[in-house]
Image: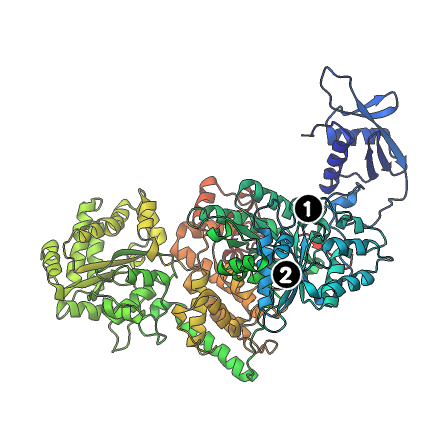
Amino acid sequence: MAGRLFTWVDIDSQLAEAAVAGRWPQWLLEVDAWWDGLELQVRPGTGSDEVRGWLDSQFGLGSATTGETGLELRLDRPAAHVPASLPVRTIESTDSGAAPRRPKLSERRVTSALSEALPRPHSERFAGDRQLTAFHSFKGGVGRTLHAVALADLLASQGQHVLLVDADLEAPGITWMYQAQGGRCDIAYEDLLALLHSSTQGDPTPAVEIAAAYLPNQRVSRYPGTGCVTVLPASRRTRLGPPRIGPADLLTEDRSPYFLSESLAALAVVAGADSVVLDLRAGASELAAPILLDPRVMRVFVTTISSQSLQGTETMIRQLGAQSPALVGTDPTPGAIVTQYRLDVHDGHAEDARRGLSAALASTIALAGTAADEDVLEDLTVDEQVLTVPVLSPFREELLALPSAWDAVVEVARRCGLPELLTEFTPDVKPAVPTRPEEPATLDGRRRALEGTARRLVFAEQRGMDSGLGFLTTEPVRRLIADHSTDLPVAVVVGAKGAGKTFTFARMCAEGSWEAFAKKNGQSVERTATVVPVLDPANISEPHADVASPQKLRDLAAGGSGVTADEIRRSLNAALRDDRADDPEFWRQRWLECLAWSAGAQQGQPAEQFLLARTADLSGACLFVIDGLEDWLESLETESRRVALRTLLVEVPAWLRMLRNRSLGLVVFVRQDLVRSAIRQNLGQFLDRYAPYELRWDTKDALRLALWMATNAEAVAEPNLPIADMGYNEIVQALLPLWGAKLGTAGSREAWTERWVPAALADFNEQIQARDVVRFLCEAAGASVGDTRWPDRVLTPSAMRRALASCSRAKVDEINEENPRLGKLLRHMSSFSDTVKMPFDAADVKLTADDVEALEQWGALARDSDGRYRVPEIYRHALGFRTQGRARVVRGL
């Protein structure tokens, strides 16, 4: 619906929006709205009916009328007022008069060019390859200035000379900190603008040299070596007021459209600074536009989780992206920081903000080139995910009332860990990937060793008891042990297929006792108990003679020949055929019988009586473990099967917990989809109870597993610290010899590898399966053999991208067995992949509302901000969906 037309300003604004949206006829060259009329520059032969029809289409039917002066555009007035209109004049012309566009948020000339991106800079890099990083926010008071200061301090601590510019000419913040410190101000940003304004022939050299001569006295935050920060305050004036010369005043036709940012880079070169950090004016301000609209500037947007700040920031990001997109692999990728939220209170809001900002940031990315780049486009989706993940900077009490002086503010920022949060905005000073002077044959040997080791563990349940690789402690296992030091666990360990359930079950059996298992994980417990397997996975391998198998443990518990897993399965199968199979009490008795038989009870011996006697004997403490439920149940299509599983997961643990001085424990390993099918009521409460033990692999866990695999295969050197005790940054550094810092050279604009790998393997619930990580390493290592272009790493970028496609196919094949309904839905969607591109509408692939809900619950589908859907990369390749081509910007235009 057209908006109100009160004055020529409304007309100009609405026609500018029409130009941006591409609603521009071929016959129309330019529009100029003035207080006394609307001027349309049209091609020769354009009829008045065409003009009238187009105006009506933009402003509403009946807006264009014929008055005393000819064609007029009706203005809105109350009924009691005299009607008003604006004359419309048409001028025929063959010359579009298209002058170069300037980096402004609002342009006076309204032409069809407004729907296009601004022209690219003539040079892809700034002078001296300097990096400019600009901090912007839609609203003030969100922590923009503080984070700009923190980044400058971080760069200085890494040995850089940083030029920190207070470009907020209306509400300066850095300037006040600097002045409170007693800093000397010989030259300011306003002075630089005035000097540049007076420059001739578009040459900033004289202005830059004058400014550089006065900067040495304005250095702060000195570090050993060359690291320091030089401050360029906003103004030397003590009186407040608007600047005499603003950045937009420099946008004359005799200068480069990006004259200001190029001049700041030139100033950095002359002043000996390695990089420039700018704190810009908040809001949709022309004071910030010439910097923000240069795609070579790393743009960092700061926002809180408040609706106004967040929505305004997303709108600003998308608008800037449409005018000045960043070219993948050439320009810095824009970033965002979410601030001022409280941990545990606003975590959900912060994650929502993160997702919305990530989608907005992804819209600012463009691919350079032509249609020949279609294959590259297919790999861009996951790169967008990891290149555009906002940084979370939660609230800290110390930031509530900042001190006034520079040193004190910087000290607070350091104590709060703000510099460490901003490491991703220092791409050109990230520590170089350490190179290893290995011969190509030795490098290929490491690749083959990793491939072989990973291939043995792709199906870890078949090797879990005798893999020879030790055991990688994960946080859920650590929590399970830590929470049960003085008593035995009664717990359900939930996890997707391939998450490591059977591997953990096998390791518990291999250790033979609860205390030995804890010790293997580097922990200690006060309770001792023999591990007693009740139900085994069908595909678990028989270990070496010196390793306890599930059957050997049952024999040990029975003091002779114990019950076999096949005998237990036959008993359970018979129970499924019993007339009482829908009765939970029947199943509780049957499960207790299975536990008792596994611990040595005789057939026919009352199970509860046996277990009560066993729990009174501390020397006979047992930790029952159950795995392989999916092998026995296959599916939960019948009510009796659902009752059987629900009773094991709910009623049996409840009975065990009622035992006093209990010396019996139970750990049940079960697939998450089976749990959801069996427990319909209070499912959330059940999952929450056992959430700490859920085998859910996040980014840190996946990277830890990759490092553990690589060190066990001797593909990379053993780190100095135990892998289980290493923090995130330590793991990332230790992985550099495996796959480098980026999917390219250290100074490239490619994605950070430690982000790309987890993002490529995760579903939309942010879950990663351990098997997918292992398979990825196996495929990537094999594909890297023979590649001599990357002597600094074991896995090459091209091999890693190819490995993702192989992992995707294997993943979908396994899902058909693990989750038949999900497999069926995925096959259904894949049948449309030849004609439908991603993102798509649910109707495009004929998904019902129930289908969409199920796919979203399983993390196999997610809705974009525009309401369309995507599938994760780990599924997309196998399903065959191609992505919609992004807007391309041809270099040099």
Residue 819 visible (yes or no): yes
- Label 1, residues with CA under 10 Å away: few <14, some 14-19, many ≥20: some
Judge by depth and name the residue closer to the eye, 609 or 237.
Answer: 237
Residue 64 image offset from top left, x and y in percent: 79, 26
Judge by depth and name the residue closer to the eye, 306 or 814.
Answer: 306
Residue 835 visible (yes or no): no
Residue extending farthest to the top is 80
Judging by the rendered image, the residue that carries numbered circle 2 is: 375
Q: Select label 1 or label 2 by which is in front.
A: 1
Q: Element under label 2?
A: helix
Q: Are marks 1 and 2 in contact (CB under 8 Å)?
A: no
Judging by the rendered image, the residue that carries numbered circle 1 is: 170
Question: What amino acid is labelled 2 in the image?
Answer: Asp
Residue 645 image offset from top left, x and y in percent: 27, 51
Q: Element under label 1?
A: loop
Residue 56 image offset from top left, x and y in percent: 76, 28
Q: How many labels does the image show?
A: 2
Q: At x 57% / y 60%, what residue is drawn? A: 407
